[in-house]
Image (spheres, grey):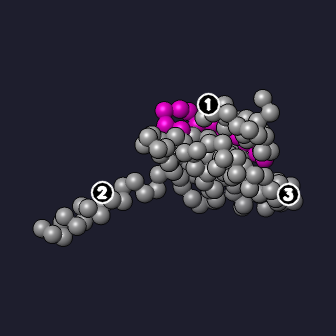
Amino acid sequence: MRELVLVITLIVGNLGIGFAQTRDKAGKTTGVAVAFYDEERLRNSDGEKSLENFMFFLNPIREIVKRDFPGVELKILRRGELLRLPDRTQLNVQHIQPPLGYILSAPGRKRRLLSGIQSDADFACAAAAFFLRPSSTCPK
């Protein structure tokens, strides 16, 4: 009987692991921003240059998410990884077109795909519109 209780406790405790969402101070799930890229599909001269530019803008975008969008988590997804999004869909980099970009997702809202390389201002404006919050990086 103790073993059964232990097994049930472990299962219940691990149910929340694997979901890409965060909760704000009130306990509400606010969303996730996912940077994704597929290195295998980017193995050519143009693709390598695109990936290099994508990585260049990733750190400023990480800072924007941290500063302007509290409760939103930035995840980085590579080929072969599956991610469950707060909108109850799943993301697999191998099956999405284009081979690099961003996904914005929140519970109860249709996710938004930002395809290709995004500058910090482009990302900030798109995230501000999606998450309905202002961003100091967005010039609008």
Count of numbered tags: 3
The amino acid at mark 1 is Leu
What percent of the width, then of the height, locates residue 31?
Answer: 54, 42
Q: Is residue 116 magenta?
A: yes
Mark with earlier residue (1, 2)? 2
Question: Which numbered disc, 3 or 1, marks the residue closer to the eye?
Answer: 1
Q: Which residue is mark 1?
A: 132
For the point 66% across and 47% down, the residue is 67
Q: Which residue is mark 2?
A: 12
Question: Which numbered disc, 3 or 2, marks the residue closer to the eye?
Answer: 2
Quadrant, the N terminus: bottom left
Magenta segment, prevailing SS (helix, strand or loop): loop
Residue reaching furthest to the bottom: 3
Q: Is residue 84 visible?
A: no
What percent of the width, then of the height, locates residue 130?
Answer: 63, 33
Q: Is residue 35 magenta?
A: no
* Label 1: which secondary element: loop
Give the vertical position of 105 relative to 81 (above or below).
above
Q: How much space separates mark 1 and mark 2, taking CA atoms?
A: 33 Å
The amino acid at mark 3 is Lys
* Label 3: which secondary element: helix
Mark with earlier residue (3, 2)? 2
Q: How much space separates mark 3 and mark 2, taking CA atoms?
A: 45 Å
Q: Which residue is mark 3?
A: 49
Left/right of residue 12 with respect to residue 19 in the rendered view: left
Residue reaching furthest to the left: 1
Left/right of residue 132 with respect to residue 47 in the rendered view: left
For the point 61% across and 46% down, the residue is 33
For the point 48% across and 32% down, the residue is 108
Within 10 Å of the Cα at label 1, are there few (<14), some (14-19), or many (20+) other Cα atoms?
Answer: few
Mark with earlier residue (3, 1)? 3
Residues shaded magenta: 106-118
